[in-house]
Image (cartoon, rainbow, N blue to C red):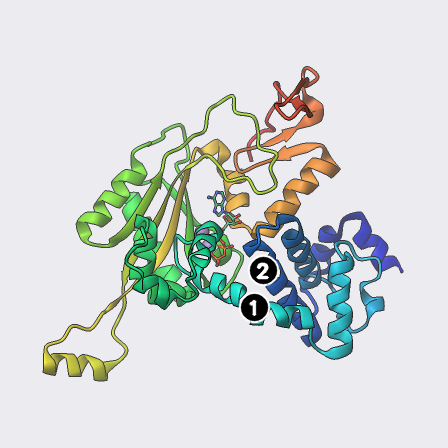
Amino acid sequence: SSRFELLDISWFTACMEAGRPVDSELKYRLMDAFEVMAENYEFKENEIFCLEFLRAASVLKFLPFPVTKMKDIQGLPCMGDRVRDIIEEIIEEGESSRAKEVLNDERYQSFKQFTSVFGVGVKTSEKWYRMGLRTLEEVKADNTLKLSKMQKAGFLYYEDLVSCVSKAEADAVSLIVKNTVCRFLPDALVTITGGFRRGKEIGHDIDFLITNPGPREDDELLHKVVDLWKKQGLLLYCDMIESTFVKEQLPSRKVDAMDNFQKCFAILKLYQPRVDNSSYNMSKKFHTEVKDWKAIRVDLVITPFEQYAYALLGWTGSRQFGRDLRRYANHERKMILDNHALYDRRKCQQPGIRFRNRKGCWLLLYQTLVPLAGV
Ligand code: ATP
Ligand code: MN
Ligand code: MN
C-alpha cells in the first residue's frame, strides 16, 4: 500500500512527517524484546546482529500505525529473518522464547550487572566473567582485581549513579554549569544536549555543549571550570580528554565515530534539599551524618563556534538517529557527516586518490573535500 512505499523511500522522513508515533502495547513488547536481544549481542560483541535489532526497535518506535499482525510489518525496512521470527512469536504467543532465554541466561545477567558500573564495559565484564565472577558482590569482594580510577568512582557512587537523573536535577546542574562557565567566558553558549534535549524526563547523565560565539577561543576553559569545582568540593571525578582535532582532518566515515573535541567526563556533587525529615531529626539526635547530596554524571564538550551546529546535532542523539543520519548522508546524499562538519563528496575539486590499505582493499581518500558553510 502507499504508506509502505513512502516508508521505502525514506522511512525516517515519513516518520517525522507522520508526527507522534502511534502506541500499542504489542509494539512495546516487541521493542523490549528487541532491546534485550540487541544488548545480548552487544555483550557478545556481535555488532552486526546488535545493530539489526536496534534498527528494528527504532523503526517500530516511530511507526505511525500500530502493529497487531504480520501483515502490518510487510515492506518495512530492517525486518530481517531474526527480527521477523521474534515478531511472529510475540504476535502468536504473547512473548518471545528467545528473549526469555536471554533474560534467564547467566552470562547476560552478569554482564548486565557489571556494565551498570560507570567505567565497566564489555571488555572488563568479559574478563571478570572468565575469572568466574558472576555478581557485583563477588567483584567487590575480590581484592586481587585492579580497578581503574573510573571504575573505583563507579563503585563508590554506584547507588547514586544507577538511580536515574531527573529533569529537575538536570535543570539544577545546568544552572551550576552555566554560572561556572560564564564566570570565565561571559558570552559563552551552554546548551543541554543528549536525552534531555530530546525531551526525555530522565537520563543516565547530563550532557552539555559549550561554545563561544566569535573568534575568541579558550583552550583552558574546561580546566578552569573543573578546577573551580574541585576547590568548591563539588568535583567527585573527572576524566579530561584533550582535543585531537586538526584542521586538515578527513571527515570520519565510521557510523559510530567518536569526535575529536576537548571534553570532560565528570561526576558532580549536587546538593539536594532535605526531604526526609525523620532521618534528619534522627541524625541530629545521634550526631550521625545524613548525606544531603547526590552524585551525578556530567559530560562537558567544548567546540569551536564554526563546528557548533554539527556538534549539537551529534550530541543531541539519539545514537541510533545519529547512525541513520550519517548513513543517509553517505548513501543517499553522497555526503559525509560527522560531529565536526558536513562534506559534499561531489564537490571534490579533484577526484579522490585511490590507494590500497594494508589488507589490500581499495580505499578512496578524499583529499580535497570542501566543508559546507557552517550553520
Ligand atoms: P542517556 O539518558 O542514557 O544519557 P543519551 O542519549 O543522552 O541518553 P549519551 O550516552 O549521554 O546518551 O549520549 C548522548 C549523545 O552523544 C549520543 O547521541 C551519543 O552518540 C553522543 N556521544 C556520546 N559519547 C560520545 C563521544 N565520546 N563522542 C561523540 N559523541 C558521543
Ligand atoms: Mn546523556
Ligand atoms: Mn553522555
Say which of marks 1 and 2 sits in front.
1
Residue 313 appears in which quarter of the rendering?
top right
User: In whole angstroms, how far apart are the C-alphas of marks 1 and 2?
Assistant: 10 Å
Task: Look at the image and tell me in which quarter the C terminus lies.
Answer: top right
Give x and y (percent) for residue 222: 31, 40
Residue 183 seen by the camera: no
Query: x and y percent of residue 39 in the render?
Result: 57, 59
Residue occupying the far right of the picture: 1
Q: Could you say which disc has been placed on residue 105 in the image? A: 1
- In the image, taking residue 232 as reference, residue 314 lies left or right, namely right
- At which x and y percent is residue 66? 75, 70
| Front residue of 356 and 354 | 356
- Is residue 255 at all visible to an observer of this figure? yes
* Residue carrying label 2: 40
Direction from residue 148 to residue 347 in the image, left or right: right
Q: Please, what secondary structure does the residue beneath circle 1 have? A: loop
Residue at (38%, 60%) from the top-left corner? 171
The kind of residue tagged 2 is Asn
The location of residue 220, given as percent across then percent down, is 29, 34
Q: Quadrant of residue 275?
A: bottom left
Residue in the image at 11% along x and 81% along y: 286
